Amino acid sequence: EVQLLESGGGVVQPGGSLRLSCTASGFDFTMYVMNWVRQAPGKGLEWVSGISDTGLTTYYADSVKGRFTISRDNAKNTVSLLMHSLRAEDAAIYYCAKDVGSTHIYYFQSWGQGTLVAVSS
Amino acid sequence: EIVLTQSPGTLSLSPGERATLSCRASESVSTGYLAWYQQTPGQAPRFLIFGASSRAAGIPDRFRGSGSGTDFTLTISRLEPEDFAVYYCQQYGSSPPTFGGGTKVEIK
């Protein structure tokens, strides 16, 4: 059974930084693109970032490009999202999501339960 | 980027009734690369449909996806109590992947 467990959420001041992590199990982590998808309170879903199976290719939404960095450690089955210069509009539940592809982003087959990021002074 | 517009915003129906949800794209979705997800309150989204019409593993056959080009539909043939939720479409035919705003299916 695929399991994705996010951690690292919390309250951060505007302009601050936070690092989210997702630990995966139940599948061959090295074979799939991994993504972060967020959901602001009471709002819809927004894809944020993705990373290819080897980690060599990364993808970002325009809204986070230059502020967020995605990475993965295939030895530890983890994917991380380092977020800098956080804004009020970044406040959301951040979901880790397993893709079906290995190099390109397709659709999100499995989801974690999410970790909440609040941006407040 | 491709903008997906879902309608209606809210659908009020009774258990056993048929639900028809629409997802319209601002431009043609390549190769029918459209997925659907279900989200119940406080839960993560659940993957339902890929390739516009293929059900994910374990998804009941009362869920049916259809459509091509710019117009896609999710039909739930007979609503079960657990089907009352918010449904999102997502296109993956072009970058970046984008989601529709969602349709809430509520109990009438």
Image: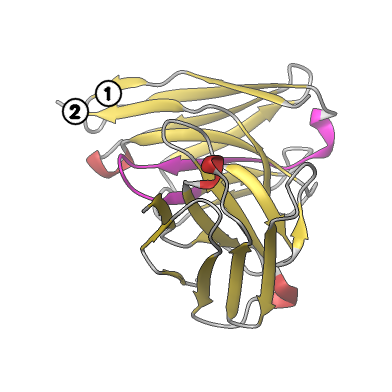
Could you say which disc has been placed on residue A120 in the image?
2
| Position in image of residue A57 (x %, y %) | 70, 47
Range of the magenta residues? Answer: A29-47
Q: Residue at x 49, y 24 (%)?
A: A20
| Position in image of residue A102 (x %, y %) | 80, 46
> At numbered mark 2, what does the secondary structure look like: helix, strand or loop?
loop
* Residue A91 horizontal side relative to residue A94, left or right: left
Q: Residue at x 52, y 42 (%)?
A: B81
Compute the Cα span from label 2 to label 1: 6 Å
* Pointer 2 and pointer 1 on the same chain: yes
Choose between B49 and A117: the one closer to the eye: B49
Q: Residue at x 47, y 46 (%)?
A: B85
Identify which amino acid the numbered label 1 is placed on.
Val
Res. B87 in view? yes
| Position in image of residue B99 (x %, y %) | 50, 59
Q: Residue A44: within the magenta?
A: yes
| Position in image of residue B108 (x %, y %) | 36, 53
Identify which amino acid the numbered label 2 is placed on.
Ser
Mark sitting earlier along the chain (2/1): 1
For the residue carrying disc 2, how many other residues have a C-alpha within 10 Å: few (<14), some (14-19), or many (20+)? Answer: some
For the residue carrying disc 1, how many other residues have a C-alpha within 10 Å: few (<14), some (14-19), or many (20+)? Answer: some
Displayed quadrant of residue A75: top right
Q: Is residue A76 above or below residue A112?
A: above
| For the residues bearing labels 2 and 1, Cβ distance under 8 angstroms | yes
| Quarter of the rendering occupied by the N terminus of chain A | top right
Q: Which residue is mark 1?
A: A12
